[in-house]
Image (cartoon, grey):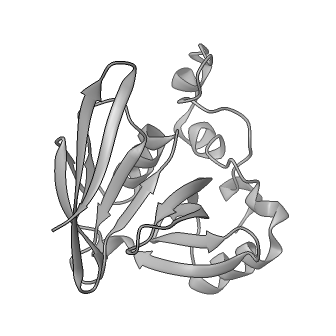
Amino acid sequence: MSEGDQIDDSKNEDAPGDESSQVQQEEPEEKIRKRDYIDIRSHPNVMKLLYKQGDQIVLFADKVLKFTGSGKMKYRYLMITDFAVYLIDPATDSLRRRIALAAVEKICVSELTDNFLIVIIPTEYDLLIASARKNEIITAFVEAYEPEVVSSNRFEYNASSDLVKQIEFEQIEGGVKTRILRK
């Protein structure tokens, strides 16, 4: 990757208390540079992986909470590039999953103000994650590949190759109640 394709760590458009509209007025390349919240240049193994895979532009990079098929939660670095989605183990900087953007059918989000999103991948199991930067993740997906984005308060997803789960969102006093159920 050339230095012009790299992104730097500075502003979070979704973070509470960030009232700045400066990001909206900048050139698109400046916005791209603003979406690296893990400073990928400081992760040589990740950089080597990107070079090896041929990715040129990182549209988004941040630590997210990934939900496994068994219901466990694990922190992962989520990176969206011009070709793929990467899940990286932050403790070892090792690749845990690579999803080609062409394999992504749609992104599912609730109609409420929660942090969950589901990446639907028909050829393999789906990806359920939570991030305070949900809107930036969706923006990066749309810039990279333009998948369908679906809003509803109830979704089914393939938590693993042989397990379908349903996630429901409900507005309650003081927030959003999220339930993940086995089908």
20 to 142, vertically: above or below: above
- Dividing the picture into quarters, in which one does residue 176 lie? top left
Say which of 127 and 41 sits in front: 127
Please provide percent x and percent y for residue 163.
Answer: 24, 79
Quadrant in the picture for residue 146 = bottom left
Indicate the quadrant containing the N terminus: top left, top right, bottom left or bottom right: bottom right
Q: Nearer the viewer, residue 145 or 74?
A: 74
* Residue at 42% from the left image edge and 67% from the top image edge: 71
Count every numbered label the image shows and give the total: 0
Indicate left or right for 119 with 155 as reference: right
Give 71 or 75, whichever is nearer the viewer.
Answer: 71
Tell me what residue is drawn at x 58 percent, y 38 percent.
Answer: 31
Quadrant of the image occupied by residue 175: top left
Vertical position of residue 77 compared to residue 62: above or below: below
- In the image: residue 145, left or right of residue 137: left
Residue drawn 55% across the image and 71% down it: 87
The percent position of residue 180, horizontal first and vertical second, equals 29, 56
Closer to the camera in the image, 60 or 160: 160
Q: Position of residue 27 (x, y in %)?
A: 56, 33
Quadrant of the frame with the C terminus? bottom left
The answer to whether 7 appears left or right of 175 in the picture is right
Q: Is residue 135 shown left or right of residue 132?
A: left
Give me the residue at 58% from left, 26% from top: 23
The answer, for residue 59, to whether it is visible in the render is: no
Image position, residue 58 (x, y; %): 59, 59
Q: Work out whether residue 181 can be spotted.
A: yes
